[in-house]
Amino acid sequence: MAKGGGRIQKSQLTHEKLQVGSSFMTYQKKGSGPRLLLCFHGYGLDKANFNLLEGPLGGQFTLFSFDHFFHGESEWNEADEVTIDKDELLNALINLCTDLGHHRFSVLAFSLGGKIALSLASSYPDRVEQMILLAPDGIKTSFWYSLATYPLFFRDVLKHIVLKPRIFHLLVAVFRFFRLVDKGIIRFAQTQMNSEAKRWRLYKTWVCYKTISVPTDRLISQLAQHRVPIDLYLGRFDKIITEKNLRFFIRKLPCLRLVILPAGHNHLIEAFARLKNIKN
């Protein structure tokens, strides 16, 4: 991946693109509040999913919502099988905040977006003012995610499934018959694998983001030492990111506030927006 700070000049901010190596992460600006909030969406979504937060949060924050690579309008210009350079991505985001005149910023992340938010907080804990995490990925990585991204042999299997999805459908049938995986997780996986374009996006996203991770012990230590305020929102009916799997993380952070919302994984942003509307 091409090296370079990912820095953009103030005159370029209207282009709504953040350069990371040879690629571009698109973003949009909403709200007019004095505090800066960086927003990172979940897998299969895009930056527009945060539009409904402008009302409840736009008076307090100026929201910058980003498209992940292989999502929305972002441009991935690197070679196939190349993973994103974590330091380069984080530096680009920090430089953007500096160019906007903000030394400190807050982050809001849903699902996959949690990987970037947590990496920012771990690398720059003194600059993170507040974290709002909605069922974040990146704290406890699933067994299946690790298999698909790290061992080379399983990545080849996954690529084969992209081209010949009958293998996937057979696995789903086996999982369902023996009740090895929750029905909600199976339905979620099926919606992301029901076309060749979606299967390729899944594979490329997994490979691209495999380096965006933080050792859990280091993450907890950094957040606790700097007393970063964390609002963690989980869905009562969420089978993807559960309170049980994050319990160890929750117990070790006294600055963390846990809120359980009456929603599943796919509707957590809407449930959060309604909650904030009630509060305000």
Image (cartoon, helix red, strand yellow):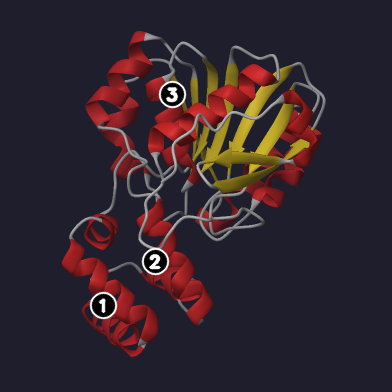
Mark 3 or mark 1: whose residue is earlier in sequence? 3
- Amino acid residing under circle 3: Ala
In the image, 236 versus 146, the foreground residue is 146
Quadrant for the C terminus, please: top right
Query: Which sits in the foreground, 22 or 52?
Result: 22
Type of residue at label 2? Tyr
Task: Report x, y in % for residue 179.
Answer: 25, 74
Q: Which amino acid type corresponds to the residue marked 1 in the rendered image?
A: Phe
Residue 203 is labelled as 2
Find residue 156 and report its image quarter.
bottom left
Mark 2 neighbour class, 10 Å CA radius: few under 14, some 14 to 19, many 20 or more: some
Q: Quadrant of residue 154?
A: bottom left
Residue assigned mark 1: 175
| Residue 34 vertical position relative to residue 240 in the rendered view, above or below | above
Q: Secondary structure at mark 2?
A: helix
Q: Residue at x 55, y 50 (%)?
A: 68
Which element carries disc 3, helix, strand or loop?
Answer: helix
Find residue 262 and report its horizontal and vertical position in percent. Answer: 56, 48
Judged left or right of residue 15, residue 81 is left
**Element type at mark 1:** helix
Residue 235, visible in the rendered structure: no
Residue 169 position, x and y percent, is 34, 86
Q: Percent position (x, y) of residue 185?
A: 39, 66
Residue drawn at point x = 68 percent, y = 22 percent: 36
Q: Residue at x 30, y 80 (%)?
A: 160
Q: Which residue is mark 3?
A: 121
In the displayed structure, does residue 22 sit left or right of residue 83? right
Nearer-the-camera pick, 125 or 56:
125
